[in-house]
Image (spheres, rainbow, N blue to C red):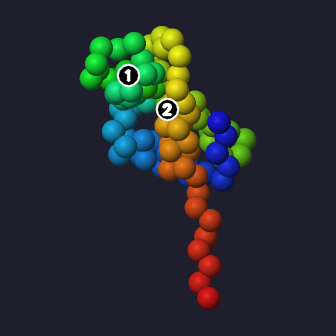
Amino acid sequence: RMIDPSVSFEQAKDILLEAGFRLAVSNPSHAIFKRKGTKNPWTTIAPDGEEVPIEVAVAEAHSGLSIHARYESFILFDTGDLARFADEIAARLALSAPSVQG
């Protein structure tokens, strides 16, 4: 998923850390973050109440950022919660349009 315009790569890393992710891999233009994920029993085969970890990769692109979210373990099917989660992350990393004062 491309995010353009976006915050800087360094700002994106800070935003994900503030959102409870831990930095697992860091390179000059690519980083992988992990955190506990969803408790949705319809999405996972995890025991009731257990959270399935989620991995988010962030990379600098030619213009903006590229992100990829995935479950850290095998998931039989997805009810769309991972896509909604990725949408929320993308919204946090997108640059807001400047406000017009008039």
Label 1 crowding class (10 Å Cα cut-off): few <14, some 14-19, many 20+?
few
101 left or right, relative to 81: right
For residue 81, which numbered disc appears in the image?
Answer: 2
Name the residue: 37% across, 43% down. 19
Task: Please say whether residue 7 is visible from this viewpoint.
Answer: yes
Which of 32 and 46 lies nearest the eye of the viewer? 46
Which of 86 and 62 lies nearest the eye of the viewer? 86
Give above or below for 66 relative to 71.
below
What's the CA distance linking mark 2 and mark 1?
11 Å
53 left or right, relative to 68: left
Residue 7 image point, x, y percent: 56, 52
Task: Tell me the element at label 1.
Answer: loop
Residue 5 image point, x, y percent: 66, 53
Name the residue: 62% across, 65% down. 97
Name the residue: 54% across, 30% down. 80
Task: Please say whether residue 25 is visible from this viewpoint.
Answer: no
Q: Residue furthest left?
A: 49
Query: Identity of the amino acid at label 1?
Result: Pro
Q: Quadrant of the C terminus?
A: bottom right
The residue where tag 1 is placed is: 41
Which of 40 and 23 lies nearest the eye of the viewer? 40
Give above or below for 50 relative to 56.
above
19 left or right, relative to 12: left
Q: Residue furthest right?
A: 62
Query: Identity of the amino acid at label 2?
Result: Asp
Which of 72 and 50 lies nearest the eye of the viewer? 50
Numbered disc total: 2
For residue 52, which numbered disc appears in the image?
Answer: none
